[in-house]
Amino acid sequence: MKRPDAYTASVTDPVGATPRGRPSPRRLPGHRRPQQRQVQRSSITLELNADLPPLLRQIAEAYGISPAGLADVLLEHALRAFCDDQIDLTPYLLPSRSPRYLWTVDVHTDDLQAAVTDYLRRQTGNEGDQP
């Protein structure tokens, strides 16, 4: 009697095979999947100005990326600009009443919605369209 192949799936063992009965790569001896570069992620909760998350979502949607991915890119550029003394925080600082922090930050986003809308309109080529 012929010994069955150890890597051929049977009806009772569908896990080890692809739909056509071939052994799946994970069951072959010595086979390893190529390791994909994993980006280290960390979670942080931020209290943002209520106007900012919808604007992040609009831009991220236009580019087909997640709002978190867009925030990563924007924060990276903002941190580099800050470290290169291109961003000055002093105009935004107000004394804080909190015992934990010396300052609170006053950010005005009044014209930011119009700027994002104009930017998205330019990117999509709809100069004359109204939102």
Image (cartoon, helix red, strand yellow):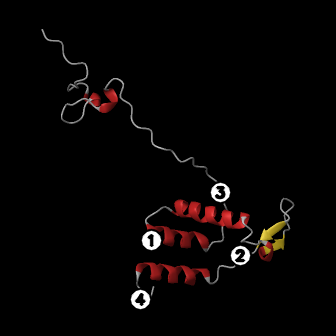
Toward the bottom, the furthest residue is 128
Residue 48 rendering spot, x and y as whole percentages = 66, 67
Residue position marked by numbered label 2 in the rendering? 107
Q: Marks 1/2: CA distance? A: 25 Å
Q: Amino acid at mark 3?
A: Thr
Q: Marks 4/1: CA distance? A: 16 Å
Residue position marked by numbered label 4 in the rendering? 129
Residue at image position (23%, 24%) is 12
Residue 105 rendering spot, x and y as whole percentages = 76, 71
Marks 4 & 3, CB-CB < 8 Å contact: no
Q: Marks 3/1: CA distance? A: 24 Å
Vertical position of residue 62 compared to residue 46: above or below:
below
Q: Is residue 47 visible?
A: no
Q: Earlier in the sequence, mark 3 or mark 1?
A: 3
Q: Secondary structure at mark 3?
A: loop
Residue at image position (41%, 85%) is 126
- Classify residue 107 as left or right of residue 112: right
Marks 2 & 3, CB-CB < 8 Å contact: no
Marks 4 & 2, CB-CB < 8 Å contact: no
> Which of the image's four quarters has the N terminus?
top left
Residue position marked by numbered label 3 in the rendering? 45
Q: Residues within 10 Å of mark 3 (few under 14, many from 20)?
A: few
Residue position marked by numbered label 1 in the rendering? 62
Toward the front, the furthest residue is 84
Q: Secondary structure at mark 4?
A: loop
Q: Earlier in the sequence, mark 4 or mark 2?
A: 2
